[in-house]
Amino acid sequence: MAEERVRAGAAVRERAGAAVRIGEGLRAYGLIAAMWVRSTLAYRTSFLLTALGHFAATGLDFLAILLMFSHITVLGGFTLPEVAFLYGTSNAALGLADLALGSMDRLGSRVRDGTMDVLLVRPVPVFAQVAADRFALRRLGRITQAALVLGWSLTRVEVDWTPGRVLLVPLMLLSGTVIFGAVFTLGAAFQFVAQDAAEVQNSFTYGGSTLLQYPPAVFAKDLVRGVTFVVPLAFVNWLPALRLLGRDDPLGLPGWVDFCGPAVAALMCVLAWLAWRTGLRNYRSTGS
């Protein structure tokens, strides 16, 4: 009994220590991000112009969809408001993850030039430093543009709104943000080994978001299987959107799979955490 009490006490202390470390990491992230926000707002005109540029650049993707629908009425069985719903949910989720963790793709350059060593000697969690480094408030442009398209689509899609379906929309955005955030982290962990793999990371984040803007029926089934079972981006919006819009799943998966977004997001977080810890522990300085 005494040994069990000792083990239980050690487990409680370990969980308390983990909670303290998470709290310290969030506080450090907030302080670093606030520093970059103050720096950005020192030049308000420049910030507004870059945010508007970001808004316009991301809006070109939706402009291409509008031009496409000037010649067709449906795409892969989806109408314009339904494609706009896919566009809005995928871009809003990516935009939120990009705002929080978009700086992770710079880790490779830090490993190559040796500045990663500076982060290791500071009394602040390395993940918080990398994630908040050069926090870019201009990324609000993508989120704003996606929110406008999503808001328009929600007023046009033909859905019998019930409390469950209404709740599915914010749950989809939250799960999608976490999934994209985990992909950002996995890409950063991979750069501990590859050192120059930012474009590989971008192909899964920004490229994945572009893929999710269009109905799954327009892609080959092998590609749909890949983004469902290998890199589960389909849980960002494809599967819950099919449920919401009353469309058939091209893979014929059971209906309960459409609600697995939060579980997949949690699993992705665990995988990203393990990959990050492994990459950081095996990091070897360049010696410069």
Image (spheres, helix red, strand yellow):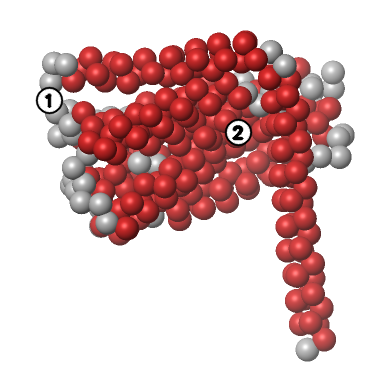
Q: Quadrant of residue 110?
A: top right
Callout 1: SS? loop
Question: For residue 122, what is the image quadrant?
Answer: top right
Q: Which residue is mark 2?
A: 101
> Disc count in the image?
2
Q: Secondary structure at mark 2?
A: helix
In this image, 276 relative to 76: left or right? Answer: right
Q: Residue 73 shows which numbered tag?
A: 1
Residue at 69% in and 13% down: 43
Q: Residue at x 80, y 31 (%)?
A: 119
Q: Position of residue 263 (x, y in %)?
A: 45, 55
Residue 94 drawn above or below residue 287: below
* Disc 1: CA contacts within 10 A as few (<14), some (14-19) or many (>=20): few
Residue 282: tell me if it is visible. Answer: no
x then y, percent, for residue 29: 72, 38
Are dots 2 and 1 in contact, CB under 8 Å? no
Q: Amino acid at mark 2?
A: Leu
Residue at 47%, 24% in the rendered image? 142
Q: What quarter of the picture does the N terminus occupy?
A: bottom right
The image position of residue 69, as x and y in percent, is 18, 20
Judged by depth in the image, the label closer to the viewer, 2 or 1, is 1
- Nearest the eye: 32 or 124: 32
Q: Is residue 217 above or below residue 169?
A: above
Q: Residues within 10 Å of mark 2 (few under 14, many from 20)?
A: many
Instruction: Indicate whether 171 appears above or below 190.
Output: below
In the picture provided, is 184 more to the left or to the right than 214? right
Counting from the top left corner in percent of width and height, residue 162 is at 27, 56
276 left or right of 168 in image: right
Q: Disc 2 to disc 1, how far (Cα)?
A: 37 Å
